[in-house]
Amino acid sequence: MTGDRPWHGQCSLQLISKTAADDLQSQLTVHQSQCTAPFKIQRANLDDDGRCQLPLLHTAGGLVGGDQLSVNVKAGASSRGLVTSVAAQKVYGSVGRSKQHPKGLWASQECHFELATNADLEWLPQELVVFQGGLYKQRMQVELQPKASFLSAEVVRLGRTAAGETLNEGAWRSSLEICRQTPIGRQWELVDQLELNSDVLQNLHGMGRQPVFGSFVWAAPDPLTAEVMETLLRNCRTDRANLEGSMACGGLDQGLVARYIGPSSQAARQWFTRIWARTRQLRRLSTPQPPREWPLQEE
């Protein structure tokens, strides 16, 4: 927010696959971007597969009620991209802070991803921290063409537990919609809607008083055979070893969903990183290296 006016930051990214100048057999991905404050794209990096890794910086340092963010990514045919954030995102409390809006105002983020045929996009923001009395909602829409792959991993902390805070009247809402164009028309692959508030946080059948929630989703480029899916899920469950928290995973018709509930953002990120590596193996891609912007990395 600047002065009394909320932010409406926008970031538009386009990913384009090109032939490497020094190796005509290799493909690399370049990007074009257009951002308005408080968004800024920092220097891109390429991994061993020519994937364009883009760190997205939110220069305001956090969100307050009424702030709006919009992220639009178009991944061209055969492009490969990874979008992460430079730091954890903070959502400050707004409930009871204003006489004009005593019930608070929602900070919001809208993300729209369009992936062309054979595109491969990974959306891996750092942790979101909802402060006491903070209100945050996000909507993600993903449009896939045939053989496109979309992967997302998000971690949210409800309240600054290290400071002795809880969520109180704050809340976090999330909507994720993934659909794919097929020879018989658009097919929904996942519609996922969640709301976490103080009641859910305290309920033993909800968060069980655990402050961290994580969600991992992979929409695979092709259907997975029953044998491959069974092996993937078994390996993902094995990957929970030595990590705090409750972790579960299950298959989609063409992909995977995993959830984390527990005390540790680091444990959630470590489990998701292990699953991420499993999906890279199935896509016959290089083992992922955590972006240099991430502070919590496994040895």
Image (cartoon, grey):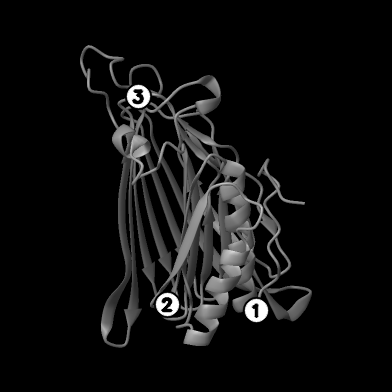
Q: Could you tell which of marks 3 and 1 lies nearer the N-terminus?
A: 3
Q: Position of residue 232 (x, y in %)?
A: 56, 74
At 71% from the left and 63% from the top, the residue drawn is 47
Q: Position of residue 132 (x, y in %)?
A: 40, 24
Q: Could you tell which of marks 3 and 2 lies nearer the N-terminus?
A: 3
Asked whether 278 or 211 is in front, the reply is 211
Q: CA distance from mark 3 to mark 1?
A: 44 Å
Asked whether 158 or 66 is in front, the reply is 158
Q: Which residue is mark 3?
A: 133
Q: Which residue is mark 1?
A: 284
The reply to whether residue 131 is in sight is yes
Asked whether 286 or 203 is in front, the reply is 203
**Callout 2: SS:** loop
Q: Residues within 10 Å of mark 2 (few under 14, many from 20)?
A: some
In the image, what residue type sits under mark 2? Gln
Q: Position of residue 165 (x, y in %)?
A: 45, 22
Dot in front, 3 or 1: 3
The reply to whether residue 225 is in sight is no
Instruction: Identify the mark at residue 254; answer none if there is no mark.
Output: 2
Q: Could you tell which of marks 1 and 2 lies nearer the N-terminus?
A: 2
> Which residue is situated farthest in the top direction here?
99
How many numbered marks have been drawn onto this rendered protein structure? 3
Instruction: Identify the mark at residue 249; answer none if there is no mark.
Output: none
Please say if 105 is above or below 294.
above
At 56% from the left and 42% from the top, the residue drawn is 265
**Callout 1: SS:** loop
In the image, what residue type sits under mark 3? Gly
Q: Residues within 10 Å of mark 3 (few under 14, many from 20)?
A: many
